[in-house]
Image: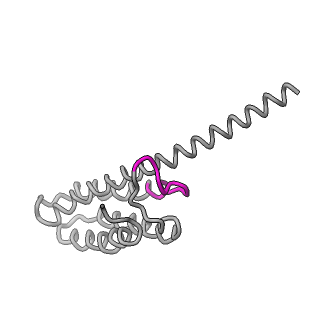
Amino acid sequence: MEFRTKIGTCIIGSLTALGLSVSIAQADAVTDRQAAMKQVGDAMKAIAAIAKGEAAFDAAVVKTNAENMAKQFAVAKDLFPDGSETGEKPSRAKPEVWSDKDGFMKLLDDSIVGAKAVAAVTEEAALRPALGALGNNSCKACHEKFRKPKE
């Protein structure tokens, strides 16, 4: 009987720890996805400066930043688990992220494809169209449907 009690205690303790770690993981998802999207924004700013003529065209800078965007979009796909609508930090994610998960994931996939297209740019003349396609087709669509405006 003592053995069963110890096993039962272990199982209950493990399940409690698992519940706590899931809870922590979901709370951390808000912070992690905000960090991923900040990296996307910073990379976009560097590329946009080149597209606007505020910085000289440098294919390596475009490639590095666009590849980082694609990577962060891919990372973000795992940072919106069910139950992570709120966390320690306020989230600007709309409920539609979870109610239309397929649509949200499609836009993240489209963003990855668009960022990879920008990363492939080697000529200055091709940058603005590629960046415009990413910004207008993926970023804007996602922000309008799935992100709350700043308060």
Using the image, determine if residue 140 lies above or below residue 57.
Answer: below
**Place of residue 15 in the rendered image (x, y in percent of width and height, measured from the top left):** 68, 40
Residue 151 appears in which quarter of the rendering?
bottom left
**Place of residue 3 in the rendered image (x, y in percent of width and height, measured from the top left):** 84, 26
3 on left or right of 40: right
- The residue lying toward the viewer, choosing from 132 and 93, is 93
Q: Residue furthest front?
A: 151
- Quarter of the figure with the N terminus: top right
Using the image, determine if residue 68 lies above or below residue 108.
Answer: above
- Give the number of marks: 0
**Place of residue 131 in the rendered image (x, y in percent of width and height, measured from the top left):** 26, 69
Residue 18 appears in which quarter of the rendering?
top right
Residue at position x 48%, y 65% in the image: 95
Q: Residue furthest right?
A: 1
- The residue lying toward the viewer, choosing from 57 and 111, is 111
71 on left or right of 4: left
Q: How is the image coloured?
A: one colour
Using the image, determine if residue 73 lies above or below residue 11.
Answer: below
Q: Main secondary structure of the magenta part?
A: loop
Residue 37 is covered by the magenta coloring: no
Residue at position x 52%, y 45% in the image: 25
86 on left or right of 19: left
Range of magenta residues: 76-89
Residue at position x 30%, y 74% in the image: 136
- The residue lying toward the viewer, choosing from 8 and 60, is 8
Residue 77 is covered by the magenta coloring: yes
**Place of residue 135 in the rendered image (x, y in percent of width and height, measured from the top left):** 29, 70
Residue 118 appears in which quarter of the rendering?
bottom left
Residue at position x 46%, y 46% in the image: 28
